[in-house]
Every structure is written in C-alpha cells, then in structure tokens.
Amino acid sequence: MLIEDVRLAFMNMAANKLRTFLTMLGIIIGIAAVIAIMTVGSAQTAENERQNSMYGVNTVSVNMWLKDGVEITEDTNTADLIPEFKESMLDKMVQNYADEIEAIAVQTYLPTGGPARPENSTNDRIYANCDVTGVNPGYFTVNKGMVPMKAGRVFSRKETVEDSYVCIVSDLLVKNLFDGDADKALGSRIDIPIASDEDSLDYTYTIIGVYGFSDMAGYAGVSSEKDISTTVYIPFKNAQALSTDPSAKKISNFDLTVIPGVDVIQFSDDLNSYLTSLLPADTNDQIYVYNNQEWIEQSNENMRKQTLTITMIGAIALVVGGIGVMNIMTVTITERTREIGTRKALGAKRREIRLQFITEAVIMSLLGGVIGIAAGIGAGIIVCHFVQHIPPVVSIPSVAASFLVSVGIGIFFGFYPADKAAKMDPIEALRYE
Amino acid sequence: MENLICLRNIVKKYYIGSENELEVLHGINLDIREGEFTSIVGESGSGKSTLMNIIGLLDRPTEGTYEMKGIDVDGLSDDELSDVRNRQIGFVFQTYNLIPRMSALANVEVPMLYARIPRKEREEKAQHLLEMVGMQDRMMHRPDELSGGQKQRVAIARAIANNPSLLLADEPTGALDSKTGQRIMDIFHRLHEEQHKTILLITHSQPLAEETERILTLKDGQIVGERVGSGSAGSADAEKAKISAKDVPATEKGDSSHKEAASFHAEHLGADKTEDAEDGIIFLELDDKGKMREEEAGHAD
Ligand SMILES: Nc1ncnc2c1ncn2[C@@H]1O[C@H](COP(=O)(O)OP(=O)(O)O)[C@@H](O)[C@H]1O
Ligand SMILES: [Mg+2]
C-alpha cells in the first residue's frame, strides 16, 4: 500500500511540477539555510581543533600595550613609550611560576632584502625565498606544533646570548638549496640579505637545525612551491643587534606554554594580575594575557550564536514551507475529491485515504528537504572555500536531523488536509464537480 | 435462490436548510436474489441514484432496514461499510470515475489493493480482467488516452476485481453512443450468463432495460412497476415477477403470473397498459414514452 502511495505521490507531483516546486521552496530554503550554517560551523570547529593542535592548547600569549589615552606631546620621546618587559620582570615571573611555565618564547621579526642562497653562490637559479625571525630556544618548545624540529638542534644558551650567526631553516629551504639533503645542509653556510635602513646586507649563517614547514596559510595554491617563503630562525640577541627598528630592542610580547594539566584560562587571569602588579604605579602600560583556549571558546560561542540565529530563520522558513504544504494539500484534495469518492466506493477505509495523502505531503516535504540539504551543502562549501578559506565539513547529524524534520513537517502539516479527505462523505465526494 | 439483498420500508430524506426536509424515497421494499439481472428505469429525479447509493452502502437510509446476505448493515461503521463495499459490491458509474494519472491496469488493481491482495497476484488478476473485457492492448494506457467505451470496460473490470456478490451500474451507458452502449451492455450480459453475477442496472434506455430479467420502474421515490424482461427465459421466471412496491401485498408467489401482477399494478396506479403480443412483453408506460426517448437521444452523443 505504502509503495503504491509513494508511486502515486511522485506521479501527482510530476503532473504539477511548478506547483510542487513552489510549495517545496520554503522547505528548501529552510533546510538549506540550516545545513549551510551547520556545514560552515562544523568546518570552523574542525579548523579550531586543527589550530588547537598546531598552536597547542597550553599556549599563552602575553602582551604589554600602551594604555589608552596616554598623552603624546612634542616633548615625548616615542621610543620611551614602547612597552617593555624588563629582564628583571621576566625573571621574577619565571621564578614565581616555576611549577606552571614549561617554556617561554620571544621573537623579533627582521625584514629581508631578497632570497637566501648558499654562501658565495653565483648561480641565480639556486635560491630560497625567506623571512627572518630572531627567537630564543624556548620558541621551539612553545611552537613545537607549528615548527617541529626535524634535524639538527635548537640554539644553545651561549648562541642565544652571544649574538651568534647560526640559523634554523625549513625543510623547504633545504629542498631548494641542498636538494633536500638535511645532512648536507647541517653545518653548511647560507647568505641572507637583511634589510637595513637604505639597502640590504648579506649576512652568512651556519645551519644548525631543520624544521618541518607546514603550509598553514595555503600559499601552495597561490604560487609555485619553489617560491613559497619560509622563515629562517636566528638567535634572538643576534636579531636584536641587526635590527634597525627601535621596538625590536625591547620585548613587548612573548608566548609561553604551561605544563600539561595546568588550567590555562585560570593561569592566564592569574598571570595578568601578577604582571600588572609588577608594573610601576605610574606606568603608561597595561598587560594583556591571551590564550588560545579562551579564543576558541569565544569563537565557538560566536558560532553557536550565529548557528542559532540562522537556525531560527531556517525554522521560520520551514514553518512557512509547512503551511505551503498544507495549503497545496488542501488544494490537491479539493481537486481530487472525485478520486477520493471513487476510492471510498472501491473500499478505501479512512486510514487508507489519510495515509495516501500524508504520504504525498511527506514525499513532497522530504523531496524539498533533500534538495535543501544538497543546496545547503553546496552553499556551505562555497562559503568555506571562498569566504572562510577553510576545508568544509558536512555535519552528518544535521543532515540526519533535516531528513527527520522534513518527514515531520510532511506528517504535521499534511495531517489536517489528509484527515479532511479521510472523513469525506463518499456520496458528496463522488458527486463533486 | 437466496435473497442477496432485502430492503424494507427504505425512506430517504434530505434536509435542506434547518427545517425543510425533502423525502426522496418513500418506503422502498425490494428483494434481489443471487444471480438476478435487474434494471431500474424511471425519469430523472425519481430517486434511482439515491436508491442505488443506499444499496451500494455509499449512503445510509433515513428509515427502514437493509439486510445483505441476511446481515443487517445498519449497525456497521463507515470503515466496516468500506470493507463490505470492497468485497461484496462492484460499482460502474456513468462518468467512469477512473483515477486519473493511473494506468488502466493500476485502476483495476485499486480494489484489490484495499483488499490487501499481494502485488503479483493483483497484477495477474488485473491483466486477466482487462483481457476479459477486451482491453488487453491498452493496459498501460491512462484514462485520458482511452475512449468512453474503453474507459467503461476498464471500470467494469475494476468493479469485478474482488469478485463481488453484487454489481451496481448507474447509467453505465448514459454517456456513450448507442452502439458502444450496446457493447458495454453485452459485457454485463456475459458476466451474468457466464459468471452468474447479480447485477442491478440503472438505465435511461428502454431497449437496454428490456434485455434484463427484471425491470423495476421508479417514480417519485416509489417502485411503481415491475415486469419481466426478455433476459428472463420461460415460465421459470414467473417467480421473478414478484412485486415489491410498498402498497402491493408481497404474498403473490409462483401461482400468479407476472402478466397479471403487472397489469394489476398498472391499473392500480392508473397507468396505461399496452401489450406487445409478439414478444409477450408487457410495456408499462408510466410517462409519455416520447420524453424518455428524447432524453436517451440526448445522452447518446
Ligand atoms: N444531496 C442531496 N441533497 C438534496 N437533494 C438531493 C440530494 N441528492 C439528491 N437529491 C434529490 O433527490 C431526488 C432524487 O435524485 P436522484 O436519486 O439522483 O435521481 P435520479 O438518479 O433518478 O435521477 C432529486 O430530486 C434530487 O434533487
Ligand atoms: Mg441518477
């Protein structure tokens, strides 16, 4: 019986294609909106989780900023206003949080004047685009997710404090300059042009370590792999010495990782007040401690709100769609009054007539739901790809829920007209013109 | 033979508005025996369809009792009536009432669908039935691809799908030309002769009514005449001439000839009586014959 009802539903829908499509539109839009936002949402959640694993859930970023509303007059020496974590302050912090802090990472960026080349190379075709960042050894502990060491070693304490010309390069640079042979690269020397005020000067560095480059920002799609710029890490002190930027001489921000098991969010709050307490009373600066986890929770919260908003819009569209189904079923039943009368004359019971028309309503809304799911996934993929630049993730539970909701709408809004049909008087139905 | 249906004092009233009541049937008494081929004639508005709908369990009488196969159908619920219609009654309508967008085959399957007959069996039976009415070449055609006569053949196949005890046909040839109508009529005759179906036929066509065994005349909601048609053969049919009109004693049995009964009845109602000596058939003209013929011609386009 159900199979015949389904077959009949398709035949009747096929006979009124435009009308059926217009009726399904509300459901299509409703389902599509929800599926699209769910696709983007789960893509974002997946992306957050991926970043989580890259940055590490235990990473905390500490910044010192100039307070809002600090007056700058003609007499002000702007260099004096650059916030700075004094060494004494950092020492105190390390001592105070010896049980919580795993590693601290500081970094300073240096502008480059061109690609790195093997020392004294004249071959134009052997080059590796790079940028230069000065870091401490702790940097590689804090950022082990993003900058995993693959060969060699990180800077020694001596190299860090003594302004040494050693560097840690990416495997991609090794590929470009040393045919991918890390053993050959380790101990080799490369020339890196570092920009100063007017032009750039080549400095020669000895490679002591190789890290694995990860294509985070998706450069690979933009230029050829050969031209991707990777970071060359040099000792922090060395970078400070070479930099012409006054802010590079001061540490105004650093990252740290806490030992696993420490509550990152609570630690961040605590650290914030501790560091603030170390600042002089008349300070122009403020401390801002930030952690990934809090950011992820914030982002998830935003996503939840967005999802809820769009789901509510979707729900409204679904109700409108449902009313459309009810309306068209009422029209269908009026048009097919004689058929209903005939069926009753031939022996159809009430529930058989009811089932027939509920089936028709369900098929209609289910088909709308399926089209909506397809459209929603399509829209979600487009948004993920072109707007958010993250890989789309189809949310299977919401697809399943959409199926159920479509069926539910068909049953709920199809019931009343179907019941009306079921209760028709056979004589009146047969006599209907 | 057993009485298949038994109507006693059937009254049907329609209520138009709150107070206005319209009595359409005024106490009908009617027995139909198994295997009988009966026709009902009467002018338009005389209550033929109303009676047919009550017999077909599509409508309920306002008063009176109705027994089918000895069972009082009065107390049955709507769904139970559906069940009885499904298994015991086959309908053939003037307007065919085939379900649009469904093939001839699928249409014939509908009653079997409601009888929960398995798909395979349903299909085979429907094919067989369509072959029987000469529609084997058009089984997959939809109603809008069929002529009137073809549609009615499909409708007849559908009506007998569940092998019902009673076949009801309300002006089945009313929308057909006389030649096509005759062919449809031949199918009814075949069903009657070969399968011994009990058939109740409403018709406007006097000649077609004459072909049946028993002709009832309805006027203003009353059975005013009953006689034997040519479909009835020999003296054995005398018994069938029993008169069931309300005001006629139902005691006359085999000893009273149908001729006498009919003429008695005709006189009683003050109607003209003519006798066709050649055919041995008595015509009971309750109305001017001319008018009836006109109506019939009007239908035959
Ligand atoms: N649903 C109804 N409401 C009111 N009057 C009706 C209804 N159905 C039929 N009638 C009336 O009952 C009478 C008999 O109708 P019907 O049985 O259809 O006659 P026939 O089939 O002999 O032409 C007519 O006068 C008709 O107007
Ligand atoms: Mg009628």
Image (cartoon, coloured by chain):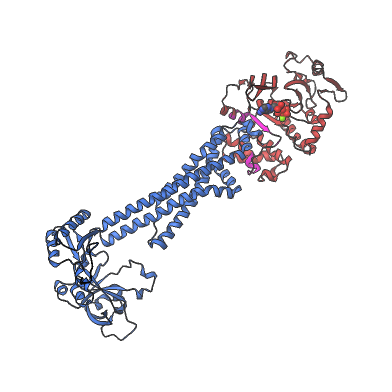
Chain colours: A blue, B red
Q: In which quarter of the image is the C terminus of chain A?
A: top right
Q: Nearer the viewer, residue B128 or A273?
A: A273
- The residue shown at (61%, 20%) is B72
Q: Give the range drawn in magenta.
A: B82-107
Q: In which quarter of the image is the N terminus of chain A?
A: top right
Q: In which quarter of the image is residue A242?
A: bottom left
The spot of residue B286 in percent (x, y) is 81, 23
- The residue shown at (64%, 36%) is A338
Q: Nearer the viewer, residue A121 or B200?
A: A121
The quadrant of the picture showing ligand 2 is top right
The spot of residue A217 in percent (x, y) is 34, 67
- The residue shown at (47%, 46%) is A318
Number of marks drawn: 0
Q: Which of B153 and A291 is in front in this view?
A: A291
The spot of residue A334 in percent (x, y) is 60, 38
Q: In which quarter of the image is residue B137?
A: top right
Residue B90 lies in the magenta-colored region: yes
Residue B299 lies in the magenta-colored region: no
- The residue shown at (26%, 64%) is A145
Residue A111 sits above or below residue A9 on the image: below
Residue A24 sits above or below residue B24 on the image: below
In the rendered image, the residue lying farthest to the front is A74
Q: In which quarter of the image is residue A99?
A: bottom left
Is residue B215 visible in the rendered image? The answer is yes
Residue A179 sits above or below residue B192 on the image: below
Left or right: where does residue A126 sit relative to residue B220?
A: left
The spot of residue B149 in percent (x, y) is 74, 40
Is residue B35 visible in the rendered image? The answer is no
Q: Nearer the viewer, residue B25 or A23?
A: A23
